[in-house]
Amino acid sequence: MACVALLSNPRSTGNKAALPRIREFVAQHPNIFHYEVGDISEVPDALAMIARVKPAVLVINGGDGTVQAALTEIYNGHHFKGAVPPLAVLPNGKTNLIALDLGAGANPVEALGNILKIVETGVDPHVVARQLIALSDGIAARPVFGMFLGGAGLAEAILFCRNKIYPLGLPNWVSHLIATIVVIASVLVGAGARWNPVRPSPMRVSLQRDGVPVEGSFLVLMVTTLERLLLNFATPFSDRAGPLKLMAIEQRRTTVLKALVSALAGRLGSARFSGLHLRRGDEIRIEGKRASVILDGELYEAGEGRSIVLTPTAPVSFLSLAA
């Protein structure tokens, strides 16, 4: 039996540079079962084959789309017949939020080596539980799954970064810094600026546990089940019940500046001011004329007269590489 199963997507951006080193590492460790897909559409077949190997750990090596496709197929496909091995994610995407949350660091080959060491010494002490976000329109039978959702201005900022900044070939952290500066500047200058990439339309967000909906035009609309985000920030939410963590920041100059100062000071989770909404719940509904969100890098839009419905899954086992 292979200790580790590695699912790789050679077409993901990070793998264009890292995959040759990963292949070399795998060649030196025969207890790694490596399956490379030619396209994301092959993920179901890949997982069916990996399930036959019965690995101790399943490692996903690809960009945001690969991770989401794998999580969705693992949850919907039932290939492992209720015995899904702990999951690990290599840092080979653009943002690596899931890998960051699990302590994978920045080097995918080094992370793979650490995973192999953990498997050889004992997996159980390193297993952590995380819940996924199930996204649907409340009608479709097959939801998609992820762990980080951005909407409103945040979704438009992500698309701006992907379409305008990533093609420049800059390091990811530089691209993210530029996108952040542009978005903040757009708020300070005003929505009328011709170059402004963020033009969110009004949205209505309702939580099952909270009868008061959040309504407005938001610079940031974020839902996550992760513990940590970019720059190693802990997710800024109270410990009230509900696995889905919602943060909404209204698109107003004073609100955005207060949120920025609070975040830099590490106090965003305890801050209380008009226009900042921090809530948790078991179900979140997002509605609006142009209600669109990005879940782990993939864009989803609600159909006419429908809502985007978010619910949590049962806990899923992941492998933490944090010391």
Image (cartoon, rainbow, N blue to C red):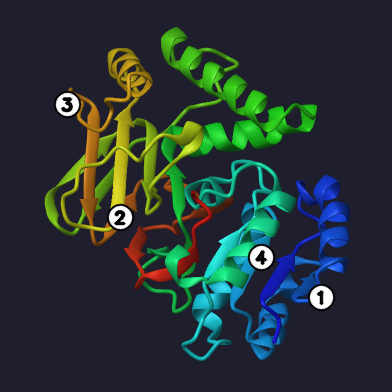
Which residue was labeled with disc 4? 116
Q: Which mark is residue 244?
A: 2
Residue 11 visible from this viewpoint: yes
Identified at 54% across, 31% down, the residue is 157
Q: Which mark is residue 30?
A: 1
- Mark 4: which amino acid? Leu
Q: Nearer the viewer, residue 290 or 322?
A: 322
Specify which label sits upstream in the sequence, 1 or 4: 1
In what element is the residue under mark 3? loop
Quote the CA–CA distance across marks 2 and 1: 40 Å
Contact between marks 3 and 2 (CB within 8 A): the answer is: no
- Mark 1: which amino acid? Pro
x, y percentage for residue 221? Answer: 37, 39
Q: Nearer the viewer, residue 189 or 128?
A: 128
Residue neighbourhood size for the residue with mark 3, other residues' Cα within 10 Å, grouped as few (<14), some (14–19), many (≥20): some
In what element is the residue under mark 4? helix
In this rendering, which labeled residue sits more in front, label 2 or label 1? 1
Quote the CA–CA distance across marks 4 and 3: 44 Å
Q: Which mark is residue 272?
A: 3
- Mark 2: which amino acid? Leu
Side (left or right) of 247 relative to 293 = left
Identified at 22% across, 57% down, the residue is 242
In this rendering, which labeled residue sits more in front, label 4 or label 2? 4
Specify which label sits upstream in the sequence, 4 or 3: 4
Quote the CA–CA distance across marks 3 and 2: 20 Å
Residue neighbourhood size for the residue with mark 1, other residues' Cα within 10 Å, grouped as few (<14), some (14–19), many (≥20): few
